[in-house]
Amino acid sequence: MEHYNMNLTLKVWRQKSANFKGHFETFKVAGISSEMSFLEMFDVLNEQLVAEGKEPIAFDHDCREGICGMCSMYINGRAHGPWEQTTTCQLHMREYKDGDTIVVEPWRANSFPVIRDLVVDRSSFDRIIGAGGYISVNTGNAQDANALPIDKQKADESFAAATCIGCGACVAACPNTSAMLFVSAKVSHLALLPQGDPERNTRAVNMINQMDAEGFGSCTNIGACEAECPKGISLENIARLNREYIGAVFSGSGESKS
Amino acid sequence: MPLSSKIPSGPLESKWKDYKSTCKLVNPANKRQLEIIVVGTGLAGASAAASLGEMGYKVKAFCFQDSPRRAHSIAAQGGINAAKNYQNDGDSTYRLFYDTIKGGDYRAREGNVYRLAEVSANIIDQCVAQGVPFAREYGGLLSNRSFGGTQVQRTFYAAGQTGQQLLIGAYQGLERQVSLGNVEMYSRHEMLEVVKIDGKARGIIARNLVTGELERHFGHAVLLCTGGYGNVFYLSTNAMGSNVTAAWKAHKQGAYFGNPCFTQIHPTCIPVSGDHQSKLTLMSESLRNDGRIWVPKKQGDNRKPTDIPEEERDYYLERRYPAFGNLVPRDVASRAAKERCDAGYGVGSSKMAVYLDFQSAIMRYGKVEAHKQGHSGADNATIYKLGKDVVKEKYGNLFDMYAKITGENPYEVPMRIYPAVHYTMGGLWVDYELMTNVPNLYCLGEANFSDHGANRLGASALMQGLADGYFVIPYTLGNNLADDIRTKAIPTDHPAFVAAEKEVNDRITRMMNIKGKESVESFHKRLGKIMWDKCGMGRNAKGLTEAIAEIKALRKEFWSNVRIPGEIKEFNPELDKAGRVADFLELGELMCIDALNRNESCGGHFREESQTEDGEALRDDENYMYVAAWEYKGDSQYELHKESLDYEVVHPSARSYK
């Protein structure tokens, strides 16, 4: 890969906390290597700000290998930036050229309040999982793992849904800030497996109820969530969730636990 | 205090069964009165918190991330070992035990390792019941693959995302308990002190990372499940936030630190590309099932790898270790890569890399697929395409990750890889019940020292994390707390809490008031360089002695010249990082002291003074068959306690993979 350096202009969202109004601030960074990751470019900027006695930009990040789901930047109008199926931490600077201007914002959704700068609160996702995104099996009760053969195709589809990293890009990308792709990924992961069958009705209903209670918007089949999902979670999962939900409501067995 | 490992008596295979049948229990009504603090929500912490919550204990769980689902177990790629023998290839509990003991170069306890092997099968059952979507064969049964240091296929996996799937399973169980009110979850919280009352751990001081406020939390017992300390090297495969702080605070409160120098350098990581590098990315060991490692036979060969003919390639692992070939354990593979690069055979622009090549695997799989589909006379291009699809299904996410980071297509050109810090076998010393020498303070998972000796085998970290959390602590905690049922919850205005909070507050204030010139990041980088150069893959007395002096000097400089922007009582990631780096600056010194003391080579600890004529590690069982448990005695003062390792069943021998 040909390596080069570049100078960039960054327009970054600054916000002291949820209680303060935010604004864009412009920064210049020089000598950015095309081999850096996008977050390493932010490291350079933050080191520069610390040296100048200014406050560095707060952003969420942890594993930096595209799996923890913590990083969450909205880059030039796209969740996680321009690369297909890529988290912010895996976006690399060879995407950009000398002189480019890059606009960086936090996830924007009422259900993800800003904590500071680019950091948002996604605890609503944990509460949705707690409402039903599990199989109720206590430790120590399991039968032999191979006593229950599972059709490979079903298992593979379940795995594909289970690769969701809970980053919230689907919500950030959606004009309605709907969390349907996230919820549907979990419902699909579990509904496609025989172990998940006994609770399928209550799960779909309780998770949807929690999603609504958290203030996420409705799905109008726009598909931006699928386009921006770093793990390529398919819209088919939303169709499956709708079937699960309707099935539960019509069967009358999908009583909400509350 | 004499160290007692509390290994139950009796034959190896019945120790744990007997323990479980005779340990004390806590009745359900009493469990509801007992409060447990769990710090860290990776595989060990999440599985422990969920299981203890189910059992009826009142649990508080803490993590520094924004959600328990993001703990770094999530990034584990390759798989989890279990002695199921589903492949009918001669596996058994004993064999998994033996491989693990041998892989650890005879520096782990027999009793602990046997228990680990024994519960491994239950882990797979438990995870499948939770809905973990492991890879399956067409018949619907679970699939297995091989990992280093073994000759059987006992590794269960979910593509290259096994850690993610296992952690999500445990996390879902945890969230279920949170919604039932059995577990209270504290995300974006960092533990900064252990509170001891009458010599027992009875709580913690935690900092709310959003508001910066300090909080006091009581617990009848405290469980540290806080992972490893590989980030002391700055560059490692750990997450950016992974740290030693919780374990280090416990150490300074009296918990012994076991074998701190035992570090695992993983052989297959994407090489460093420049000074800007913030972390290193692993390419799973599972790739060595199918990838072949080589360098050119000629020094300084600058041809493209695809232009170098077969006969001019040195498949050095296959050459040196014919019995295990590319699947030798990690320490052996890492040293072999370093040896070739140091000798001038390295590849890539830095010459500090070797090739991991999939061409022959792609063609081999392609031929099988062509046969399956009835194209026995298929041409090479068709075979290649079919084979590529198979490789993609097995390792697709890893290949994609490699392509994004390097800009190269690993299906076409071999991957370039080099060893990187990955895991720490050392950690807080614990007994058979996972309790440290501080009563009521437990340590689980990577954070403890217990099961992997001087080198961990691949796919065993996930096994240990979940074994500790699901299957060990639920028994051993009860055995101890059965004597504590009369202890009422201690109010957090107790003087011990007040004093501990003041201690933490003073430390933070002192750090913030330095207002120096150099960033936290810069100190961390400098520490990492000392550690990598002098306490990395090769260690010697001279280098370690220098490192100790350099770290002391660096620590002094940190405490007089670090610059931390912002305020204490606000969301301030620089301050969080400063606290972690301050602890690394102390731990690094202890690692070097331990490495200097252990004048033998074993597992990942390679003392250059102690090697065979052909460069293999040379153990010294006569003098070093012990766990080095270090007691903190004040600034730079550590006292060594030795727990001797008694092998009753296995006879330690020179570890050979030839």
Image (tube, helix red, strand yellow):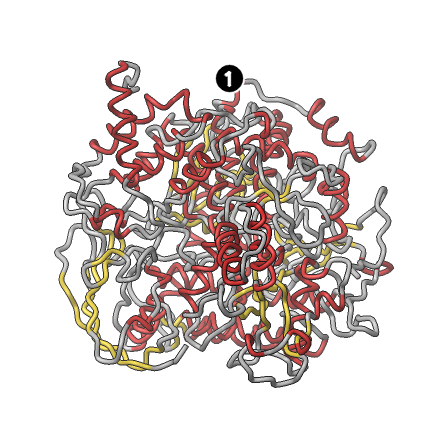
The location of residue B477, given as percent across then percent down, is 60, 32
Q: Is residue A53 left or right of residue B42?
A: left
Going by the numbered disc 1, the residue's amino acid type is Ala
Circle 1 packing at 10 Å, graded few (<14), some (14-19), many (20+), is: few
Quarter assignment of residue B69? top left
Residue name at image x 52 percent, y 42 percent: B43
Q: Nearer the viewer, residue B437 or B363?
A: B363
Q: Nearer the viewer, residue B118 or B303?
A: B303
The location of residue B235, given as percent across then percent down, is 50, 67
The location of residue A93, given as percent across then percent down, is 33, 71
Q: Is residue B210 left or right of residue B255?
A: left
Q: Is residue B624 left or right of residue B555?
A: right
- Using the image, name the chain to which the residue with label 1 belongs: B
Residue name at image x 54 percent, y 38 percent: B136
Q: Is residue B169 above or below residue B372?
A: above
Q: Is residue B538 above or below residue B178?
A: below
Residue ID for mark 1: B29
> Given the current orientation, which residue lies at the most extreme top position?
A252
Helix, strand, or loop for circle 1?
helix
The location of residue B343, given as percent across then percent down, is 68, 81
Q: Is residue B485 left or right of residue B314?
A: left
Q: Is residue B451 above or below residue B551?
A: above
Q: Nearer the viewer, residue A25 or A161?
A: A161
